[in-house]
Structures are given as C-alpha cells and as structure tokens.
Amino acid sequence: MKINLWVLLLAFIMIYFVFQIREDMIRFNELEAGNCRLLKSLDEVKQQNQGLAVRLRKLKQDYFIESLARERLNLIKKGEVAYKVCPQL
C-alpha cells in the first residue's frame, strides 16, 4: 500500500506540473502576441515621427512659409498686384 501512495503522490505532482507548464505556455503566447502588437505600433509611431520631422524641416524654410502665406492667407509682396479670378455665371 505504501508504494501505491507514493505512485499516487508522484502522479499528482506530475499533473500539477503539467498544468503549470500549460499555464506558462498560454501566458507566454499572450505576451508574444502583445509584443508583436507593440512592435507594430512602435513602427507606425516611428513612421509618423519621421513624417512630422520632414514637415518641420519644410516649415523652417523661408520659401515654404512664403508659399503657405500666399495660399492660405492670400498675402502678396510689396509691389505685386493681386488678381482675383471669379468663375463665370
């Protein structure tokens, strides 16, 4: 009877470790999936950051500021004549 008790105890211990390993594997897979999502998000943010850096460099250039002022604010230089084109009705 003593041998059967040890075998039973050993079986319970093995079952316990099997379930622990299973839980660890599930958790590992969840962490891997989360890591992939975060890396993808990081790449998107890096691309967005690069685009913003390019835009910032453009905004620091005089000719770009001038073209924006002409387009959006309808500004002109001294001595220039502004014409407004109206559509025909």
Image: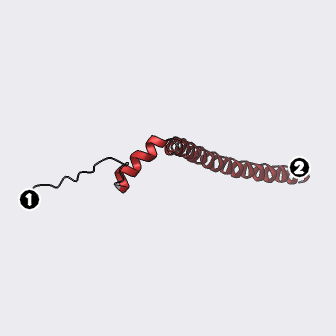
| Residue 81 in the image, given as x and y percentages of width and height | 28, 49
State the mark number for residue 89: 1
Q: Secondary structure at mark 1?
A: loop
In this view, which residue lies farthest toward the bottom? 89
Q: Amino acid at mark 2?
A: Ile
The quadrant the C terminus occupies is: bottom left
Q: Nearer the viewer, residue 24 or 42?
A: 42
| Residue 69 in the image, given as x and y percentages of width and height | 40, 51
Q: Which residue is mark 2?
A: 3
Which is nearer the N-term, disc 2 or disc 1?
Answer: 2
- Which scheme is used to colour this image of the protein? secondary structure
Q: Amino acid at mark 1?
A: Leu
Measure the alpha-carbon separation of dots 2 and 1.
104 Å
Residue at 48% x, 42% y: name it: 62
Q: Residues within 10 Å of mark 1 (few under 14, many from 20)?
A: few
Is the residue 21 above or below the residue 89 in the image?
above
